[in-house]
Amino acid sequence: MKEAYEALAKNPANYVPLTPISFLQRTAEIYGEREAIIYGTRRYSWRQCYERCLRMASSLTELGIGKGDTVAVLAFNTPEMFEAHFFVPMTGAVLNTINTRLDAETLAYILDFGEAKVLIVDRELLPLAQKALQQTKQKPLLILIDDETALQKPDVELEVKHYEELIISGDPEFSCPPLEDEWQALSLNYTSGTTGKPKGVVYHHRGAYLMSMGTAAGWELPNHPRYLYCVPMFHCNGWCHVWTMTLLAATVVCMRAFSPKLLFDLLERHEVTHFAGAPVVLNMLANAPPEEQKHFERSIKVMTAGAPPPPKVLENMTKFGFEVMHTYGLTETYGHILLSAPQAEWKTKSEDRRAELLSRQGVRFPTMEEVKVIDPQTQVPVPADGNTIGEIVMRGNTTMKGYLNNEKATAEAFSGGWFHSGDLAVVHEDGYIQIKDRAKDIIISGGENISSVEIENVLYQHPDINEAAVVAMQDETWGEVPCAFVELKTGKNTDAQQLIEFCTERLARFKKPKKIIFGPLPKTATGKIQKHELRGRIK
Amino acid sequence: MKEAYEALAKNPANYVPLTPISFLQRTAEIYGEREAIIYGTRRYSWRQCYERCLRMASSLTELGIGKGDTVAVLAFNTPEMFEAHFFVPMTGAVLNTINTRLDAETLAYILDFGEAKVLIVDRELLPLAQKALQQTKQKPLLILIDDETALQKPDVELEVKHYEELIISGDPEFSCPPLEDEWQALSLNYTSGTTGKPKGVVYHHRGAYLMSMGTAAGWELPNHPRYLYCVPMFHCNGWCHVWTMTLLAATVVCMRAFSPKLLFDLLERHEVTHFAGAPVVLNMLANAPPEEQKHFERSIKVMTAGAPPPPKVLENMTKFGFEVMHTYGLTETYGHILLSAPQAEWKTKSEDRRAELLSRQGVRFPTMEEVKVIDPQTQVPVPADGNTIGEIVMRGNTTMKGYLNNEKATAEAFSGGWFHSGDLAVVHEDGYIQIKDRAKDIIISGGENISSVEIENVLYQHPDINEAAVVAMQDETWGEVPCAFVELKTGKNTDAQQLIEFCTERLARFKKPKKIIFGPLPKTATGKIQKHELRGRIK
């Protein structure tokens, strides 16, 4: 019967390319009058949001934007940024959201590299854009988001079109050109480029659609969550939550700039049920002045990802009423692909043990097909002993198309039919994965692998420490030894000797830092501690 | 940049064909020790379920089953039936579950038409299988499910392999051949055959994967539901809930044969949170003896599909603690594609109005891309006035590949790039769809579609009958039952009892007419029998 089964072909009625644009169409159709977006005093229903996106897509189309063009956005988490995630792909173009904290030179590099035809920019960022555009070959059309809450009035003279004017002049009956191929590029996200130039990670429509479905199932999202958009949407398209929340007809509260006080206030004022944020955000909430903190009776679900949050921080979250789901992912994987899925029997464990279990990065989301930890030399999976370190590799539909115009890096990342994360981890007996370090952050001391993260977790347990980062320092005897950079909380004055003793009590002797250096820690635009800079300081 | 974006190609790390088999692999990996299946005194964890499926897939492969072969299953809702939904596709073969209530002749037709290489059969159904196999060209290998709770011991002599022996001899380390194309056929489900022979509806892996994701989001399913499998798995693969429940690592309680008492008992004993059933099932629950009924403090979510249950029945459901979600779908659409998604403002309506709103079939699931109601003549959508009747058409990824070996029917069903349901409906002002009349001739009895033409064909075989027409008659228990209008040949006087017996010998029992009305049949000028007038007579 093989031939008979295979003879049944695809047609427009039984095969439709997957795209997250479909979520907006459905949600506007069914839940048109529900509140979609809350931002300051602005409110949009799903019907309004869809109509605005159609109008903007029609205006961009009029301006000559279409399939394969890059539309860059340099903006904060405002309604315009949310809308761009729909109206740009509606035209067939590729959305390139850009980190707002970049320097002008990197911004110029990105605009040129992606050949941006349009740059949609928040008025506060116009001076930065101008500086970048003085260096670019590419001269994109500028569209200004004239957000009245922006801190800075534009004091630059650039020819711009106005976002709201393009909305008004747009056609609310715009008919999107049908997506022909779900493999088509949807968005372009740059890596932070810790080693040289940032790479342009390309997502496709299929991946974003599946990422949303997988997040809904993996994070157990209900319909109509009330979601606070704290993660910058320029990060992996805000972990693809723009699309996930649209699928679920959520109400999305936009947060232009993060502060602990504003976050607590918004959670309360808008009865937020879900938000997501990097561990550094959780850390800032935990260390906020008590008068700014709020404790909630109801449970608020929080997704975090990135460096494992120290157990101490997770403990603090529980006090606020936050139920933290720890995840792991990369720009290359549309955001989170592992989650610390809780097991029924964890309830019977001690609180400490439970925090430990929950702080592991865990197991794969339903839309990631396979994740394993392999010996980088032999490519063989490491034993599930919680001890042997290997590299995390994976395959699945929420892995990028590749790096834009970078065949070499693309081929390397995908070598052997697996995506190589560059992150080092162990596998526990129960199959849960725990990140130990970035490959380049591991410290090799006397032949032993030492995880810098493990030492950092111990340091974070010290009551006087605000932030800590551990890097390898050259050593004549051991090759490398750990060196800790520490920023104390205001008014504290613990010394190096005390901190080393603190570590010695809690770690294998060979893992204790040999040196402690005090002072503020340098960070990337995305808030990641810049370890390469710290390494440079002790060379 | 179009070329640069398009240059990024699919590879094994970033493109994996979608298949529901992936759900079992993940769930067994992460929730291996959770209870997967409960059936009588039998219990399987997800690890055991996966291992049994691997063993059975390896045994079938050993027996020569592979890509494009048809494996038929004639069984009740037992663990074997559940497992077949995984181990058959694991071999690359196509799963053909068959209605257990069919007559031997139709069964024979199905086995031949699909060229079944294997027939997995419950021992209670072995006599029926034997009768069918006496008529088939195809001689499938028989695998016996020797369920100890089966009513009937096989009193037939057929050479069979034993299911559990194939499990034992199978390889638990079996490596499934990787799915090359998500468009590959996954299962074969027969329609009831409104105009003569049943048609073979072919599902593909992509559709079943997406159906599960869409059901989870649309029905707001949590992880680990406790699901009672009441819908026969031979119906649209049990509305694809086999796969959905595996995605969510549910605990599935199998129910071999329906009775209200058993259902209430199982709900209580196993703390069931979700189940699904045809309206006739709800009706039977509502009409069960009070001593068999149970009322629950907790809310139990119930999905129903088909004719809207009468308000009286819905009212009863509320008393039991059931929260009913009304849906609509067809065999051709993997089951449910519309749902009566509740709107926030419905809470403020009167109870009667709310019941009315909830009894409409509603709006599309996220995985169905577009559903509209069109004028069958002009193909133009009918106005959303709650009054103008048109045909429901749709397009989306949960629409069948097509009808097996039936180009004509496939082309007709997909004409103009839409799947034509043959069901008649109106669209209300809020966009919600309400079915007004199933395709005119179909009779929906106890959740089964009965073709009036099939019964008429039998009646016409009777030597005394001149003309016959069968229409649906309302029935308190079954929703609808067949009523036959018969005009005897002059001078003949066969009575109703004799005609019903005549049909019983030639049709599945549930298809026999419950009532025979004698007399001349009303006709149009062109000689067509006016069925709508006959329906009017028995209202």
Image (cartoon, coloured by chain):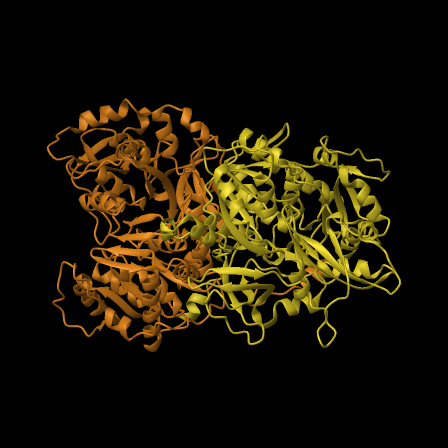
Chain colours: A orange, B yellow
Location of residue B190 with respect to A295 vertically, above or below: below
Residue at 30%, 34% (x, y): give it.
A314
Give the residue at x 12% y 64%: A153
Asked if residue A34 lies left or right of residue B330, the reply is left
Quadrant containing the N terminus of chain A in the rendered view: bottom right
Residue found farthest to the top: A505
**Foreground residue among A14 and A106:** A14
Instruction: Tell which of B299 and B474 is nearer to you.
Output: B474
Q: Position of residue A424 (x, y in %)?
A: 40, 40
* Residue B202 found in image quarter: bottom right
Residue at horizontal 41 percent and vertical 43 percent from the top:
A219
| Residue B420 visible | yes
Residue A521 in the image: above or below residue A186: above
Is B438 located above or below residue B358 in the figure?
A: below
Q: How many marks?
A: 0
Q: Where is residue B475 drawn, in percent x and y?
A: 65, 50
**Quick check: A93 above or below A278?**
below
Quarter of the image containing the C terminus of chain A? top left
* Along the line of sight, the residue nearer the viewer: A515 or B208: B208
Depth check: give the residue in front, B164 or B455: B455
Is A197 displayed left or right of B224 in the figure? left
- The image quarter containing residue A107 is bottom left
Q: Position of residue B431 (x, y in %)?
A: 44, 62
Q: Residue A139: tell me if it is visible.
A: no
Left or right: residue A250 versus residue B179 is: left
Q: Position of residue A310 (x, y in %)?
A: 30, 34
Residue B297 placement, left or right of A51: right
